[in-house]
Image (cartoon, rainbow, N blue to C red):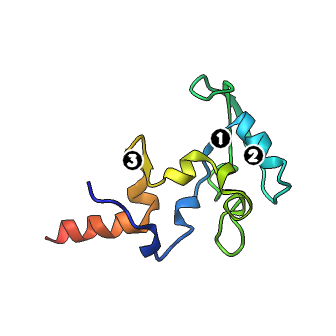
Amino acid sequence: MRTVDCLKCRQKKSCCDFGVWVDLEEAKKILSLGLKGDFYHLEEDKDFPSGYRVGTSYEDNHCSFLTPEGLCAIHKVDYNLKPAHCKEFPYENGKLAPIADRLCSVVKSRRKIKRRT
């Protein structure tokens, strides 16, 4: 499997076009940073350590922690608190995430090249 080099991305914030699910306890730590951004849609989910998850975006809007410059406000302050899903993207469980071909411009461009050949 070839790796994706995010430094080659021309649309660095495209992976943040939709938010991610975050464990409730993780969200509390992020909120303690006092950043502009919020969490939405508290839901019960046993796949998360606390048993609850919250989203970083409202409906289909971009991540609420995305700065006007297109950077992650969490990453800028404390990379360790950046949600794991964000750190791993465009991968999920060691494989290319199913949504990567829609959100990752590097993956999109690779697929276009493969189709032409």
Q: Secondary structure at mark 2?
A: loop
Q: Secondary structure at mark 3?
A: loop
Query: N-terminal of the two: label 2 or label 1?
Result: 1
Which residue sits at x=70%, y=50%? Answer: 58
Query: N-terminal of the two: label 2 or label 3?
Result: 2
Judged left or right of residue 71, residue 31 is right
Q: Amino acid at mark 3?
A: Pro
Q: Tags 2 and 1 in contact by the CB under 8 Å rule?
A: yes
Q: Secondary structure at mark 1?
A: strand
* Quarter of the view holding residue 100: bottom left
Task: Find residue 22 and report its horizontal and vertical position in percent.
Answer: 65, 41
Residue that label 2 marks = 39
User: Closer to the camera: disc 2 or disc 1?
Assistant: 1
Task: Find residue 71 and report its horizontal and vertical position in percent.
Answer: 65, 69
* Quarter of the view holding residue 17: bottom right
Q: Amino acid at mark 1?
A: Val
Query: N-terminal of the two: label 1 or label 3?
Result: 1
Residue that label 3 marks = 98
Q: Tags 1 and 3 in contact by the CB under 8 Å rule?
A: no
Q: Amino acid at mark 2?
A: Phe
Measured along the vertical axis of the image, is residue 44 above or below residue 114?
above
Q: Residues within 10 Å of mark 1 (few under 14, many from 20)?
A: many
Task: Find residue 63 and report its horizontal and vertical position in percent.
Answer: 66, 57
Residue that label 1 marks = 22
Judged left or right of residue 62, residue 117 is left
Viewport quadrant of the C terminus: bottom left
- CA distance for labels 2 and 3: 24 Å
Which is nearer the eye, 47 or 29? 29
